[in-house]
Image (cartoon, rainbow, N blue to C red):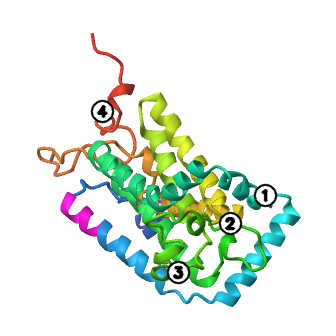
């Protein structure tokens, strides 16, 4: 606080205190959260419980078959109006190559879980400072997708009435798919919008492309969501517009992570700096969420200049 006086003709006025600099007041959503070092036991428990909860809620959503089929008809007509309704042609073309479509069936049934889990493990081990924020983006993406399943039931193309789509799992008797066949009663068949195969694969692809240091691995990161898009259409499990819904959910997920941490997940330090208390000040050092004091720990070794 600083005092000031004002002199007038009648003499000196009393000093009026005023604040030189008031501390900025950040709102709850604008206050950045410092990354924390992830704990493996907590992450395993969290991922297991979250996936179980996701499956439980997704499958508990009323199937609403009539509404789901009407929505599918509307989507199909909308795509015809946009000139992008080529899913049926792709489905028949790929189905004519048995080894290819069977491979795609297994791809659809397994890779969305295997690759996503693999990227989470890689982040935990190699990018612990970015792990929490990136995981938050994935969880927020999945959470908003559950809302979509409830509010907009949608039949996949293979279950549409009066359509000529091939249910490739049924025709080729692919083992292990929850989409149809013997296990179809264990999964909600009318939760096609949005496509989390696309939401999760885009999350994986962007994470790998942004953070990997090996060029061919970064290319694989870009190819993974592109291949997934072909697979979900060729197997008649999704429309193109379902993929758009998945991408919008991912945008929401990254927005939540950005609001919570004050930066995009990939802009955070690679490693959570060790807390070091300054002598006499009691402040933590190296906890910035971007570059600066924590920059050496938050930079990939491959990007650092060689030391002579």
Separation of residues labelled 2 and 1 (CA atoms): 14 Å
Separation of residues labelled 4 and 2 (CA atoms): 54 Å
**Residue 115 visible to an observer of this rendering:** yes
The mark lying in front, picked from 2 and 3, is 2
Residue count near mark 4 (Cα–Cα under 10 Å), binned few <14, some 14–19, many ≥20? some
Which residue in the structure is indicated by mark 1?
86
Residue count near mark 1 (Cα–Cα under 10 Å), binned few <14, some 14–19, many ≥20? some
The span shown in magenta is 40-46
Separation of residues labelled 2 and 3 (CA atoms): 19 Å
Q: Which residue is at 42% across, 75% downward?
A: 54
Task: Identify the mark at residue 166; answer none if there is no mark.
Answer: 2
- Contact (CB < 8 A) between labels 3 and 1? no
Q: Residue furthest left?
A: 279
Which residue in the structure is indicated by mark 3?
188
Task: Identify the mark at residue 296; answer none if there is no mark.
Answer: 4
Quarter residue 65 falls in: bottom right
Separation of residues labelled 3 and 1 (CA atoms): 25 Å
Whether residue 97 is in magenta: the answer is: no
Q: Quadrant of the C terminus?
A: top left
- Contact (CB < 8 A) between labels 2 and 3? no
Secondary structure under tag 1 reads loop
Residue count near mark 2 (Cα–Cα under 10 Å), binned few <14, some 14–19, many ≥20? some
Secondary structure under tag 4 reads loop
21 or 167: which is nearer to us?
Answer: 167
Majority secondary structure of magenta residues? helix
């Amino acid at each position: 606080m600083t005092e000031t006086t004002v002199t007038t003709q009648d003499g000196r006025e009393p000093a009026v205190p005023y604040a030189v600099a008031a501390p900025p007041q950040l709102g709850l959503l604008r206050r950045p959260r410092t990354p924390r070092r992830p704990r493996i036991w907590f992450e395993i428990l969290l991922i297991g419980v979250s996936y179980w909860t996701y499956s439980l809620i997704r499958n508990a959503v009323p199937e609403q078959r009539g509404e789901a089929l009407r929505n599918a008809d509307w989507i199909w007509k909308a795509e015809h109006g946009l000139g992008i309704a080529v899913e049926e042609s792709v489905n028949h073309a790929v189905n004519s190559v048995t080894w290819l479509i069977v491979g795609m069936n297994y791809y659809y049934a397994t890779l969305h879980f295997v690759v996503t889990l693999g990227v989470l493990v890689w982040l935990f081990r190699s990018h612990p400072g970015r792990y929490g924020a990136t995981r938050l983006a994935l969880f927020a993406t999945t959470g908003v997708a559950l809302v979509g399943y409830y509010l907009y039931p949608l039949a996949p193309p293979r279950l549409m009435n009066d359509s000529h789509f091939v249910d490739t799992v049924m025709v080729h008797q692919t083992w292990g798919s929850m989409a149809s066949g013997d296990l179809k009663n264990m999964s909600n068949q009318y939760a096609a919008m949005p496509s989390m195969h696309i939401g999760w694969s885009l999350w994986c692809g962007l994470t790998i492309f942004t953070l990997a240091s090996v060029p061919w691995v970064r290319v694989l990161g870009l190819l993974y969501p592109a291949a997934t898009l072909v697979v979900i259409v060729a197997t008649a499990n999704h429309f193109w517009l379902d993929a758009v819904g998945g991408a919008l959910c991912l945008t929401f997920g990254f927005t939540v992570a950005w609001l919570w941490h004050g930066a995009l997940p990939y802009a955070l330090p690679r490693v959570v700096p060790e807390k070091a208390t300054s002598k006499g000040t009691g402040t933590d050092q190296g906890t910035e969420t971007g570059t600066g004091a924590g920059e050496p720990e938050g930079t990939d070794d491959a990007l650092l200049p060689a030391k002579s």
